Amino acid sequence: MYFDGINSQLFLHENCGFDNKTVEQLIEASEIQLHSLEDWHQKYKPSMTPVILVDYNDPAFDPIDFENPSFPGQNINMVITQAPLHLKTTDLLKYGRLRGIFYKQQSVEEIAAGLRTLSEGNSWLSRGVTDQLLSYYQSVLIRYAPPHTINLTRREMEVLEALRIGKSNYGLAEQLFISEHTIKSHLYKIFRKIKVKNREEAVVWAHHFLP
């Protein structure tokens, strides 16, 4: 469903990378409303896709902060700001559904153009980043075993689902009420079963195969 040509809502994390003056300039230049994440429940519309803008340099970043109030863990799109020109693939993967990147030193006009594109439901990623992610996904997926051949236990599925939304080992243990040692044991077994080498590859597998 479109609202005046817009089908995505843009929410600003408290560490969005822009000061108040810049936010005002961006709203004026883009003619797009930027909502505070604090207004999430008031401004959120289930018929529109939420897009969260967060500072790449935010040390407290946790994907769990961006839970969809109606469908937890699903359909949350991320945009990072103040990013360096060259990003490692592992840095990109931690944002899950990465929809856009704004780099340091970009002008208000350039960022406003990106916001308009994002508000229309499109991505704002360079060809280089798109190729980088596509290459990684292809290299990983080609090694995956089909999900119907994987015999994951119920607990392993719970661990993998929590891992998918960015939980640390401590966070996994806290959520599932088990020790970090047990979490490490579960992860070891999961990695072997789905034929991945690390957490990043497991997250990609989970995004691709889990409902």
Image (cartoon, grey):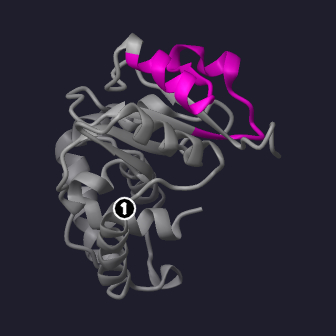
Q: Position of residue 75 (x, y in %)?
A: 59, 48
Residue at point 20% right, 72% down? 197
Q: Quadrant of residue 89?
A: bottom left
Query: Is residue 207 in view from this perspective?
Result: yes
Residue 155 to residue 106: above or below: below
Q: Is residue 99 magenta?
A: no
Q: Quadrant of residue 78?
A: top left
Give the structural element (helix, strand or loop) at label 1: loop
Q: Which of 24 and 141 is in front in this view?
A: 24
Q: For the residue carrying disc 1, how many other residues have a C-alpha within 10 Å: few (<14), some (14-19), or many (20+)?
A: few
Residue 122 to residue 201: above or below: above
Q: Which of 151 and 100 is in front in this view?
A: 100
Residue type beneath disc 1: Ser
Residue at point 47% right, 62% down? 207
Q: Does the magenta stretch include residue 37?
A: yes
Residue 148 to residue 104: above or below: below
Query: Is residue 190 in view from this perspective?
Result: no
Q: Where is residue 44 in the image (x, y as percent from the top left)?
A: 68, 27
Residue at point 23% right, 48% down? 182
Residue 93 as seen in the image, left or right of residue 111: left
Residue 39 to residue 70: above or below: above
**In the image, which residues are magenta?**
22-50
Q: In which quarter of the image is the C terminus?
A: bottom right
Residue at point 19% right, 55% down? 87
Residue 126 as seen in the image, left or right of residue 87: right
Q: Position of residue 138 (x, y in %)?
A: 36, 82
Q: Position of residue 185 (x, y in %)?
A: 21, 57
The residue at which mark 1 appears reads as 126
